[in-house]
């Protein structure tokens, strides 16, 4: 692919302005994801009584669509990114309400909804949209005299956090909270309040530990692995140990056959066993690269909205990757969270493609036109 | 928004907002202040972005480090390869083995495994249940599936699996199943040594027999316990006792083979036997070890001790005699002979024909005190010592009157264990030393502390007399050709629970030693309640019932223990310097088999 520098078509301009390194990193991640989904999901699909490759097929057919969404979104202008984000947020609000009303229940939580023959997890789409909308409100609050941006953003967060907790989905609430917190922090939250909010967040976690039985259990298990059933984590640690430097080869691992969540929450363990330390390090590096390169590019950003929105999206992306990998490595208590672009899950894949597409759109080199809010 | 921002942004140029910093026209000043505010916000945002970036960087570094730590340093606690325990480790158990004197295993501990499931980890209970049911056909798929679907994290599936079952279940590779190593006591010879070795409960705590008396010892060490028992002799004794018990329809039997010199017990049997591998199936009445826990009036067997006592005290000499024509009257009791004789009987004849009257006469010549002293020295009046739990103490008469002395002289009125009887016999034939009986193998050259119960001379005379009983007297059926068996029969009516003696319920016994020229082994056989048969002319006496058992045991064990038979010779000719005082009237006389 080559475009002349002078090509001013939409695609030509896109090629010269888009962050091609990040795009490449995302493409590699999607590629690794495709390999791992082929390796890990047959064991799972056989276990739940489906054809060997049915889960893999489901995921693989979505990959081109995800790619298309990613590219399409990255073509958007900042203004359209904002519009899509805000409209998307309205859409997810409706879907979240509908989920509470007509969604179906799995594993004790109501997080899914049928839409046009597909099951959909609206909370996945909520995260990027929320990051955009929240960034917009914060930026407006800073640039518009008298605009209560902070208050509105906080209210927005409160509403969606409540909706997520109603499902209940603690993990997504946590991610949403961190997105909101990081944006708030960047938007100039007074240091006193930073400390206060950090303390508040800590208090919330302690509260969850004290009053939510399954959180208590998870954390106790983390602190004292001998005490109870840490089956998945134990297997996961064995997987990394077994994989060693170069792994046993794609498809050759055996941990996936005994790990119930080998294709989703513990896909990183499968990677550790089959692809080995080197590839796992590369995966960590890729996630780190995307996040830190994104941050680095934002350091020269002139638009507060872009700065906040892109930071929110990157935070979501990086946080999910970190939580998933750290869970599998027993660095933190287990928390179900997809590994971006690698874990099985249609909603997650498409929503992340959407979010990263918006990010690419935001980080495109623009001739600075001032704050566009 | 767009419309309003248009108004404000007008003064700024597309590429250089910095132009307006510092001072502008009045129109621009409004913009500048706003622009400065925006700039300040941006600056704060950028600075704080660095903080957020640093945190992310640290987090990613932590993940990377942890990854390297896990993959390379391998500290998950689980070894890369299952450690293969050394053969010694695999065999090491919590309870030591019990061996016979030749190293044969009498009791051992087997490592077994017990299967349990953590249903929380079982991914596919139905499939797992179906696979398991193929290995453990005694369980139905439905019951296994129910267990594997429980809402707990622990449930036993089966305890005490065989190694084959364990291997097959392991091969199924069902997640959520695991084994616990357990140990089970196993007795390779089953009922053969049931009473002697005993057994343990499910927690491997000894319940009876050696398992109980050596419970602490066995638990504390890995060195096996070496007993004095000879598995081969134990088998021979049990076998012959069992045959006799069946033939004579007895309710039980007991037997002891004792090393006359060292006191080591080579065999100790009590029938009916018990199966230590299935203690739950043992009927209550089989627990009694007749050889060590049963006390019996041994009957005429005691005449051996009475004769030895009379000779030892010098009350009588071998050539003395008594008139046995008249029963002895004591109060309302009358002491008579089973097969009455008339006229004078010499001391050898009294023993040969088992005359109660003659025995009472010679005992009374020595006196009650002499009898008590002598019997005490033979260990017949106290609880014996042996490495078995619950040994019975002898039953003595509450008041030892003259009548008691009389009846005890021929074996009634004093109940002792077969163990005591055999031990006393060892003293009679080994030169007069009462050696403590033991179930542990004595080490070579071990010095024994033994009391001199009688003089060597008396012992010498007794050997001659005992051989005579088998050669010419009531013990003829015990005469194992060439092995110089000597002994004494005993037939004692059992005590009736309602008082007095029972009709037709007796103990038939034979107390013997061989080879009589230099006795090495004491053999005692006892049948409880034998029934007379036509073949025995309606006798069920020690001579008919127990003597053949001794003969068979001796014939079978002697070759194993290296006792050489002497063809066609009696020991008399080998006894140098021993006066052969066989009364003339014994020659060629038919002797009744009692």
Image: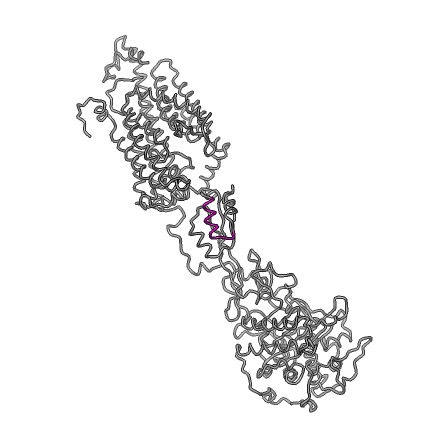
Farthest-out residue, right: B331
Q: Position of residue B168 (x, y in %)?
A: 44, 54
Is residue B241 positioned above or below B311 on the image?
Answer: above
The reply, left or right, for residue B60 in relation to residue B538 is: left
Let me know if residue A288 is in the magenta part: no
Quadrant occupied by the N terminus of chain A = top left
Q: Is residue A205 left or right of residue A244?
A: right
Residue sticking out furthest to the bottom: B584
Q: Is residue B319 above or below residue B8?
A: below
User: Image check: A167 left or right of B5?
Assistant: right
**Residue lying furthest top:** B26
> Vertically, is B518 above or below B67?
below
> At 54% across and 68% down in the image, what residue appears?
B227
Which residue: 64% across, 64% down? B286
- The magenta span reads B125-138
Q: How is the image coloured?
A: one colour
Q: Is residue B136 magenta?
A: yes
- In depth, the one of B58 and B122 nearer the eye is B122
Q: Nearer the viewer, residue B78 or B182?
A: B182
Quadrant of residue B568 within the rendered picture: bottom right
Kindly indicate the quadrant of the structure image that contains residue A141: top left
Looking at the image, residue A212 lies above or below residue B239: above
Q: Position of residue A215 (x, y in %)?
A: 47, 34
In the rendered image, which quarter is residue A337 located in?
A: top left
What residue do we see at 59% from left, 89% from top?
Answer: B573
Q: Quadrant of the C terminus of chain A?
A: top left
Q: Position of residue A317 (x, y in %)?
A: 34, 30
Per the picture, the main secondary structure of the magenta-coloured stretch is: helix
Residue B490 visible within the image:
no
């Amino acid at each position: 692919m080559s475009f002349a520098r002078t090509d001013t078509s939409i695609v030509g301009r896109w090629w010269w302005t888009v962050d091609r390194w990040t795009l490449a990193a995302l493409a590699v991640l999607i590629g690794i994801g495709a390999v791992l989904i082929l390796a890990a999901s047959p064991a799972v699909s056989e276990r739940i009584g489906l054809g060997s490759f049915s889960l893999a097929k489901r995921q693989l057919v979505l990959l081109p669509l995800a790619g298309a969404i990613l590219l399409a979104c990255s073509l958007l202008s900042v203004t359209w990114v904002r519009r899509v984000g805000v409209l998307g947020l309205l859409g997810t609000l409706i879907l979240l309400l509908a989920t509470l009303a007509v969604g179906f229940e799995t594993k004790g939580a109501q997080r899914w909804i049928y839409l046009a023959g597909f099951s959909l997890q609206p909370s996945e789409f909520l995260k990027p949209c929320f990051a955009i909308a929240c960034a917009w409100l914060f930026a407006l609050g800073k640039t518009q005299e008298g605009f209560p941006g902070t208050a509105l953003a906080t209210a927005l967060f409160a509403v969606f956090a409540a909706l997520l907790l109603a499902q209940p989905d603690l993990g997504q609430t946590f991610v949403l909270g961190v997105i909101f917190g990081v944006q708030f922090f960047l938007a100039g939250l007074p240091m006193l309040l930073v400390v206060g909010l950090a303390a508040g967040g800590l208090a919330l976690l302690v509260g969850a530990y004290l009053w939510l039985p399954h959180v208590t259990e998870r954390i106790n298990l983390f602190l004292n692995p001998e005490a109870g059933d840490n089956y998945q984590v134990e297997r996961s640690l064995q997987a990394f140990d077994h994989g060693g430097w170069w792994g046993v080869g794609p498809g050759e691992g055996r941990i996936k056959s005994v790990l119930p969540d080998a294709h989703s929450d513990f896909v990183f363990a499968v990677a550790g066993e089959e692809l080995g330390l080197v590839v796992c390090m590369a995966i960590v590096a890729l996630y780190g690269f995307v996040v830190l390169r994104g941050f680095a590019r934002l350091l020269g950003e002139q638009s507060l909205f872009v700065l906040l929105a892109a930071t929110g999206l990157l935070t979501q992306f990086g946080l999910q990757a970190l939580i998933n990998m750290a869970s599998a490595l027993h660095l933190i208590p287990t928390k179900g969270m997809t590994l971006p672009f690698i874990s099985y899950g249609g909603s997650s894949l498409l929503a992340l493609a959407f979010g990263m597409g918006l990010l690419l759109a935001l980080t495109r080199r623009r001739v600075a036109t001032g704050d566009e809010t | 928004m767009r419309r309003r921002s248009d108004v404000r942004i007008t003064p700024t140029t597309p590429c250089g907002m910095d132009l307006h910093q510092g001072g502008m026209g009045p129109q621009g000043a409004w913009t500048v202040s706003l622009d400065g505010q925006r700039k300040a916000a941006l600056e704060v945002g950028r600075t704080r972005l660095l903080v957020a970036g640093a945190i992310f960087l640290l987090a990613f570094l932590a993940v990377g480090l942890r990854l390297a730590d896990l993959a390379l340093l391998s500290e998950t606690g689980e070894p890369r390869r299952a450690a293969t325990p050394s053969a010694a480790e695999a065999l090491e158990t919590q309870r030591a083995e019990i061996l016979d004197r030749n190293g044969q295993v009498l009791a051992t501990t087997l490592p077994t495994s017990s299967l349990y499931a953590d249903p929380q980890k079982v991914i596919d209970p139905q499939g797992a249940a179906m696979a398991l049911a193929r290995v453990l056909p005694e369980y139905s798929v439905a019951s296994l599936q129910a267990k594997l679907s429980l809402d707990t994290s622990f449930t036993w599936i089966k305890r005490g699996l065989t190694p084959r079952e364990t291997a097959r279940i392991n091969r199924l590779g069902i997640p959520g199943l695991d084994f616990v190593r357990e140990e089970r006591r196993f007795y390779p010879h089953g009922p053969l040594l049931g009473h002697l070795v005993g057994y343990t409960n499910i927690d491997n705590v000894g319940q009876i027999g050696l398992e109980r008396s050596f419970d602490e010892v066995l638990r504390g060490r890995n060195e096996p316990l070496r007993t004095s028992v000879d598995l081969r002799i134990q088998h021979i004794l049990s076998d012959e006792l069992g045959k006799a018990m069946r033939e004579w329809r007895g309710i039980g039997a007991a037997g002891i083979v004792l090393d006359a010199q060292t006191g080591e017990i080579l065999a100790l049997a009590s029938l009916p036997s018990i199966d230590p591998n299935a203690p739950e199936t043992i009927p209550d009445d089989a627990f009694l070890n007749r050889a060590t826990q049963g006390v019996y009036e041994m009957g005429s067997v005691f005449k051996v001790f009475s004769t030895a006592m009379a000779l030892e005290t010098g009350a009588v000499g071998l050539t003395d005699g008594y008139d046995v024509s008249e029963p002895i009257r004591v109060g309302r009791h009358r002491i008579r002979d089973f097969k009455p004789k008339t006229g004078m009987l010499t001391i050898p004849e009294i023993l040969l024909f088992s005359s109660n009257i003659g025995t009472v006469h010679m005992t009374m010549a020595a006196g009650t005190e002499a009898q008590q002293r002598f019997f005490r020295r033979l260990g017949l009046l106290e609880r014996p010592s042996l490495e078995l739990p619950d040994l019975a103490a002898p039953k003595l008469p509450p008041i030892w009157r003259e009548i008691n002395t009389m009846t005890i002289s021929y074996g009634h009125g004093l109940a002792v264990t077969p163990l005591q009887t055999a031990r006393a016999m060892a003293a009679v034939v080994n030169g007069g030393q009462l050696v403590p009986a033991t179930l542990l193998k004595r080490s070579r050259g071990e010095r024994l502390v033994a009391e001199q119960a009688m003089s060597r001379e008396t012992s010498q005379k007794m050997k001659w007399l005992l051989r005579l009983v088998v050669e010419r007297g009531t013990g003829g059926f015990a005469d194992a050709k060439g092995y110089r068996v000597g002994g004494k029969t005993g037939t004692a009516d059992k005590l009736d629970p309602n008082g007095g003696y029972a009709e037709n319920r007796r103990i038939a016994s034979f107390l013997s030693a061989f080879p009589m020229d230099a006795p090495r082994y004491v053999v005692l056989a006892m049948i409880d309640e034998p029934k007379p048969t036509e073949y025995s002319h309606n006798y069920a006496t020690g001579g008919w019932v127990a003597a053949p058992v001794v003969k068979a045991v001796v014939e079978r064990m002697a070759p194993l223990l290296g006792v050489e038979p002497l063809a066609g010779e009696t020991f008399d000719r080998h006894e140098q310097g021993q006066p052969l005082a066989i009364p003339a009237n014994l020659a060629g006389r038919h002797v009744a088999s009692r």
